[in-house]
Structure formats: C-alpha cells, structure tokens
Image: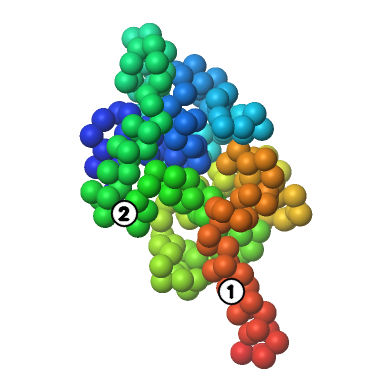
Amino acid sequence: MVLDATTSDNQWLSVLLSYYCGLRCEEICYLTPNSFETDYRLVISRSKLTSSRRSVPWKLLIPEEYQDCMQDIVSSRLATGSMYLLRENMQRPMPTWKLSKQIGRLLVRCNSSVRKMHGLRHGFASWNLFRYFMLVDNQFRRDVQTGRFMSDIVGRHPLFGDRSLANFSEVIGGAPWRYSFKVNGECVSCATDFIILSKLLGHANRFTTLEHYCNSLGWVVHYFLLRREAIITGE
C-alpha cells in the first residue's frame, strides 16, 4: 500500500489528504496546523480559484485507523510552532513542484496504477461516485460488496463497507441521510446531490467534475443499462 511505503510525515499526510479528501497538491502545501479548525472540519483557504476555497469534513472521509496518527502529527506541528502542516521550512510552504515530484516517484516505486499525485484526486472522485450510487441503490450496493459489479472493483475494501458508507451518507445528505441509511439501508436521491461531490473537490461547477474526474462513470452507466435490459428481456 502506498501509505505504508511513505518515508516521511509529509508524504504520508499528502497521500492521505489527496486520496481520502480530494485535495490538490497546492492546497496541501498551503495547509497550516490551524487549518484543522475543529476535530471535524478541515478548512482549505488557499486554492487555485476563490470558489475552490472550502471546508472538508475530514473525519467522515478519512478511515478511522488513520485519524489518530494524523491528529498526532497536527498536534506536533502546533507544539513546535510550524507555520505549515508539511514541515519543509518553518516560514515557507513546500513548493508544489517538489511535493508533486516526491509523490509521483513514490507512486512509481509502489507500482501504483496512477503515476502522478493528481491521480489520487481522480481516485477520490471515482470512488465517491461509486459510493454515492451504493447509498441510493440497494442492489448496486450489494453487487459491489459481493463482487458482482466488476472484477476490477474490490467490493470488500473498507471504503465500501457499511460503516464507511454511513459516514459518507452524512457528508452528502447530513443527519437525515445517515438515519435513512441506518434504518432503511438506502437514501432518497435528489437531482442536486452531485453538486455536493463537486463542492468537495472545489470545482466551480459540476460539469468540471463530470468531464475530468469521474472516469468510472461509464462503468456505472453500463451497469444500470444491463439491469434495465434484464428487466425488459425478462432475464
């Protein structure tokens, strides 16, 4: 696993925040220890666009097994007076090109399916698109979790487990969605749901997300087309 192969806190934090929270390289470089405004929200105040400035509910996105370690690192940075979360220089952020290069080399060394840091952000968008459909369609959730969706998708990955999905339901629809998922195992979709994922990524509009990030959308469409075909043909 890439996280296990990191050789510094900087690399570990960068992979974690890019893959599980969808942060850009520049956004990570400019994070400060105080960016963790609460033990729930991560505030991104520096990004390539003003509209990309946002807060991320990191505690609902990052797996619990990594949260204590991340909080320990943040506390350490606060205690030592580090101005930026990535400890490269006490007064200046790590250059984005340098971080991108380090993570790119790490991904190559791990023989990862992606070779650039930005690919981790693509993964965040793709997996959360899958998880969204798992929340609003019980059969899709079962098919992903039991491996009937696609052989390339590891349905037993913790991200696709019910506990992780319950957290993600709160990200998308708040307490009502979490309650609905807990009681009914399914949430009622809305036409504006996709905007939430776009906001998590810091996009100005949802079309950017559709065009550039959700490269797995074709698989989902194919799945639902096959289901409809089965209903029509009676198979």
- Quarter of the image where one finds residue 92: top left
Q: Position of residue 89 (x, y in %)?
A: 33, 16
Near mark 2 (Cα within 10 A), the count class, few <14, some 14-19 or many ≥20, is few
Question: Would you say residue 133 is visible in this rendering?
Answer: yes
**What residue do we see at 67% from left, 40% from top?**
204
Asked whether 55 or 185 is in front, the reply is 55
Asked whether 9 or 189 is in front, the reply is 9
Residue 141 vertical placement versus 232 (above, below): above
Asked whether 58 or 165 is in front, the reply is 58
> Which numbered disc flags the more N-terminal residue, 2 or 1?
2
| Residue 112 tag number | 2
- Report the colour scheme: rainbow
Residue that protrudes farthest toward the right in the picture: 191
Q: Amino acid at mark 1?
A: His
- Would residue 72 be found to the left or right of residue 7 on screen? right
Q: Position of residue 124 (x, y in %)?
A: 49, 48
Q: Amino acid at mark 2?
A: Ser
**What residue do we see at 46% from left, 19% from top?**
32
| Residue 57 tag number | none
Q: Secondary structure at mark 2?
A: loop
Q: Secondary structure at mark 1?
A: helix
- Would residue 157 be found to the left or right of residue 4 on screen? right
**What residue do we see at 50% from left, 41% from top?**
22
| Residue 222 tag number | 1
The C terminus lies in quadrant:
bottom right
